[in-house]
Amino acid sequence: MEKVSGKLTVFFEEPFWVGVFERVLDERLSVCKVTFGAEPKDYEVYDFVLKNYYRLRFSPAVATNVKEAGRNPKRVQREVRKQVQNTGIGTKSQQALKLQQEQLKTERKITNREQREAEKQRQFELKQQKRKEKHRGR
């Protein structure tokens, strides 16, 4: 059976409020970072998740071990308190974000290189056309 779990952590990262979406699917963690700007209210975060979740660009999946969640309400309350006090991102999340950042960087490099080569080719063809026109005596 396939298990999917998600978690959203909102914290202040100078100078903006940032949200980190963590998604665990088949023991694989993928992460997406969203910048909110001003401190978002609870209803604004909820509205954002409802409207934009399927448009988020998650990082490539990283292997992780999934812990079974305890059902004891006191334990859950302690975990929530711990998570609220913990303002950082988990190291797996940081790795996944870094992987996504590197992937986007390589995509940008490829598109920029293709644009440069296309421009060079266009300039070369213009130069050749001018040479032909001169050769014809026009």
Image (spheres, rainbow, N blue to C red):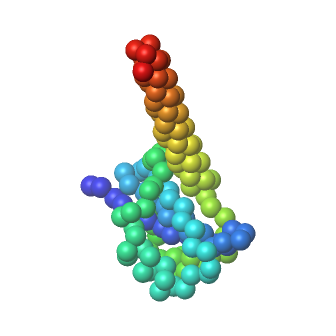
Using the image, determine if residue 45 lies above or below residue 18.
Answer: below
Q: Quadrant of the C terminus?
A: top left
Q: Position of residue 23 (x, y in %)?
A: 44, 59
At 46% from the left and 27% from the top, the residue drawn is 126
Q: Would residue 39 appear left or right of 106 to someone viewing this image?
A: right
Q: Position of residue 108 (x, y in %)?
A: 52, 42
Using the image, determine if residue 1 lies above or below residue 77.
Answer: above
Q: Kindly give the residue lying farthest to the front in the view shown.
A: 138
Given residues 50 and 3, the one toward you in this image is 50
Given residues 78 and 46, the one toward you in this image is 46
Rendered image quadrant of residue 48: bottom left
Is residue 100 something that shows in the picture? Answer: yes
Q: Position of residue 26 (x, y in %)?
A: 37, 51
Given residues 138 and 74, the one toward you in this image is 138
Q: Would residue 45 appear left or right of 98 to someone viewing this image?
A: left
At 49% from the left and 83% from the top, the residue drawn is 44
